[in-house]
């Protein structure tokens, strides 16, 4: 049988299938409602539990002064003198609250990088990042340690809500060309099923969650 004959047979079967559609076996499964329902726990607790299960490191801060103090302590403990941050708003917030160790200009040789995020997904312990952030595409993945700073009003339960939040964030502009979910440190088990952390990105990921201001 030649190629053209085989192609015609395939197209014929497709036309027949379209003419006689098969009923959906489980009609109740159709729809846009998420099968995942929020737990009775607060979103902050659920995110922290799921994020730390994936080897992420979580810290809660009552306000931005506590955030700056915790970052200072972390940098001192780890002896980090090369912390990279590209976001002007984030640098201003940290600087005005007493943290200044982010003037290192080279992402390629830094100890750690600091970014904000679009939102946090409590159900999966994921960070939603985009190229629309001032930090750009590489800051969260190129440094050996990624530090994400988020606020409690950025927490949502599931991925659908997270993507809707991103859409709301860019309602007056085009959506970013890259939207990605980072779920804990980079890891793979491709080689002999042995888990290796940090193979394609940061070896450590910290999330500092700050209580949102009521103002």
Image (cartoon, grey):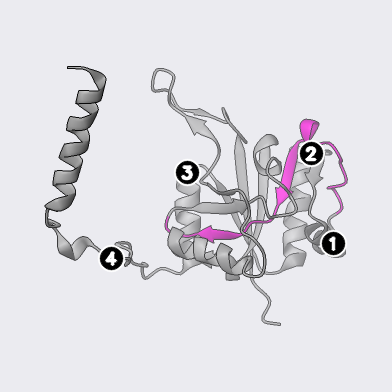
- Say whether marks 4 and 1 touch (CB < 8 Å): no
- Say whether marks 1 and 3 touch (CB < 8 Å): no
| Residue 80 numbered tag | 2
Front one among 176 and 12: 12
- Image position of 197 with respect to 17: above or below: above
- Disc tally is 4
N-term-proximal mark, 2 vs 4: 4
Q: Give the CA distance from mark 3 to mark 4.
A: 31 Å
N-term-proximal mark, 3 vs 4: 4
Q: Give the CA distance from mark 2 to mark 4.
A: 50 Å
Residue 6: image quadrant is top left
Tell whether 150 sits left or right of 95.
left
Q: Nearer the viewer, mark 2 or mark 4?
A: 4
Q: Give the CA distance from mark 1 to mark 3.
A: 31 Å
Image spot of residue 48 (x, y percent): 50, 56
Front one among 156 and 180: 180
Q: Is residue 158 visible?
A: no
User: Which residue position is annotated with label 4?
Assistant: 31
Secondary structure beneath dot 1 equals helix
- Image position of 151 with respect to 52: above or below: below
Which span is picked out in magenta? 100-123
Q: Nearer the viewer, mark 1 or mark 2?
A: 1
Q: Give the CA distance from mark 2 to mark 3.
A: 24 Å
Q: Nearer the viewer, mark 4 or mark 1?
A: 4
User: Which residue position is annotated with label 1?
Assistant: 92
Q: Is residue 40 magenta?
A: no
Secondary structure beneath dot 3 equals loop
N-term-proximal mark, 1 vs 3: 3
User: Which residue position is annotated with label 3?
Assistant: 54
Secondary structure beneath dot 4 equals loop
Image spot of residue 64 (x, y percent): 74, 66
């Amino acid at each position: 049988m030649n190629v053209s004959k085989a192609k015609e047979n395939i197209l014929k079967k497709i036309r027949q299938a379209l003419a006689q559609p098969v009923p959906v076996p489980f009609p109740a499964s159709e729809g846009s409602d998420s099968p995942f329902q929020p737990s009775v726990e607060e979103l902050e607790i659920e995110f922290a539990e799921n994020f730390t299960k994936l080897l992420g490191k979580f810290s809660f801060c009552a306000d931005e002064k506590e955030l700056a103090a915790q970052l200072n302590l972390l940098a001192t403990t780890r002896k980090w003198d090369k912390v990279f941050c590209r976001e002007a708003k984030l640098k201003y917030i940290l600087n005005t609250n007493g943290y200044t160790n982010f003037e290192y200009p080279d992402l390629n040789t830094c100890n750690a990088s600091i970014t904000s995020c679009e939102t946090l997904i409590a159900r999966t312990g994921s960070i939603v990042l985009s190229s629309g952030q001032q930090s750009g595409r590489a800051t969260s993945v190129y440094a050996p340690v990624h530090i994400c700073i988020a606020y409690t009003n950025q927490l949502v339960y599931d991925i659908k809500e997270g993507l809707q939040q991103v859409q709301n964030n860019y309602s007056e502009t085009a959506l970013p060309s890259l939207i990605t979910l980072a779920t804990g440190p980079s890891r793979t088990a491709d080689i002999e099923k042995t888990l290796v952390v940090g193979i394609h990105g940061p070896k450590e990921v910290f999330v500092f969650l700050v209580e949102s201001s009521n103002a």
